[in-house]
Image (cartoon, rainbow, N blue to C red):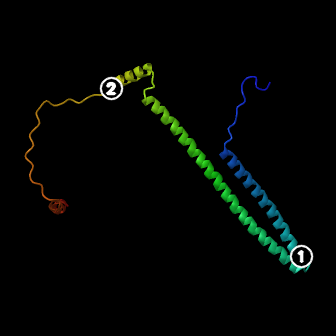
């Protein structure tokens, strides 16, 4: 009886969504691992201090070497987390770009349909009426003079570009 008023909405979980979820789960596991190592490092530090007080220098040294190794593991874990976060961000960026591209394709399809003439006759009439209203109301053409234009004198032989550029600086100097 749970579906009296409609069907359940199906959520579309894509492969990308699954990949992002797995990456985020892996990141969370690595963070938990980091916390455990940090707690263990603190305990080993206190145990090493206690061993030194008790005069067991060799055991304390061994424990400090183990601590150093775990700190290196901690650094590697931090790098892995950073890489995972970059992958998640890049996947999300790709998804965003794909969504924008899909929206653009849909928009282009709508434009293509409009240009292909899939408009109804009523739409065509509305568009023509709007075009007429725009052209009749807004456009004012300037008056055209009725006088004849003067004749242009015959063109003289043009000087080469070099000669013109030589005289140009003189004119500019005279102007200054």
The Cα–Cα distance between marks 2 and 1, rounded to whole angstroms, is 96 Å
The residue shown at (36%, 25%) is: 131
Displayed quadrant of residue 38: bottom right
Residue 152 lies left or right of residue 15; in this view the side is left
Residue 175 lies left or right of residue 34; in this view the side is left
Residue 30 lies left or right of residue 104; in this view the side is right
Instruction: Of the two numbered discs 2 and 1 on the same chain, state the one appearing first in sequence.
Output: 1
Q: How many numbered marks appear?
A: 2
Q: Where is residue 50 in the image (x, y as percent from the top left)?
A: 89, 74
Quadrant location, the N terminus: top right
Residue denoted by label 1: 51
Q: Which mark is residue 107?
A: none
Displayed quadrant of residue 118: top left
Above or below, comparing residue 133 to residue 145 in the picture: above
Displayed quadrant of residue 129: top left
Residue most extreme to the right: 54
Q: Are marks 2 and 1 in contact (CB under 8 Å)?
A: no
Q: What kind of element bears circle 2?
A: helix
Circle 2 crowding by C-alpha within 10 Å: few under 14, some 14–19, many from 20: few
Q: Decide which of 60, 83 is in the foreground and name it.
A: 83
The residue shown at (76%, 68%) is: 71
Q: Position of residue 141 (x, y in %)?
A: 25, 29
Quadrant location, the C terminus: bottom left
The residue shown at (8%, 40%) is: 151
Q: Which mark is residue 135?
A: 2
Circle 1 crowding by C-alpha within 10 Å: few under 14, some 14–19, many from 20: some
Q: Position of residue 136 (x, y in %)?
A: 32, 23
Above or below, comparing residue 33 to residue 70 in the picture: above
Q: What kind of element bears circle 1?
A: helix
Q: Decide which of 18, 79 is in the foreground and name it.
A: 18
Above or below, comparing residue 4 to residue 67 in the picture: above
Q: Position of residue 135 (x, y in %)?
A: 32, 26
């Amino acid at each position: 009886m749970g579906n009296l008023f409609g069907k359940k909405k199906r959520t579309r979980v894509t492969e990308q969504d699954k990949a992002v979820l797995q990456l985020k789960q892996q990141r969370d596991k690595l963070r938990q691992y980091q916390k455990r190592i940090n707690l263990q490092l603190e305990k080993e530090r206190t145990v090493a201090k206690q061993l030194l007080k008790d005069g067991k220098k060799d055991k304390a040294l061994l424990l400090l070497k183990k601590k150093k190794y775990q700190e290196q593991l901690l650094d590697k874990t931090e790098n892995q987390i950073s890489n995972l976060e970059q992958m998640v961000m890049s996947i999300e960026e790709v998804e965003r770009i794909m969504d924008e591209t899909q929206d653009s394709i849909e928009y282009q399809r709508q434009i293509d349909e409009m240009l292909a003439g899939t408009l109804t006759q009523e739409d065509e009439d509305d568009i023509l009426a709007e075009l007429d209203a725009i052209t009749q109301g807004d456009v004012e053409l300037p008056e055209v003079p009725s006088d004849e234009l003067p004749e242009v004198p015959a063109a003289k032989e043009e000087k080469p570009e070099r000669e013109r550029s030589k005289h140009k600086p003189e004119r500019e100097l005279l102007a200054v």
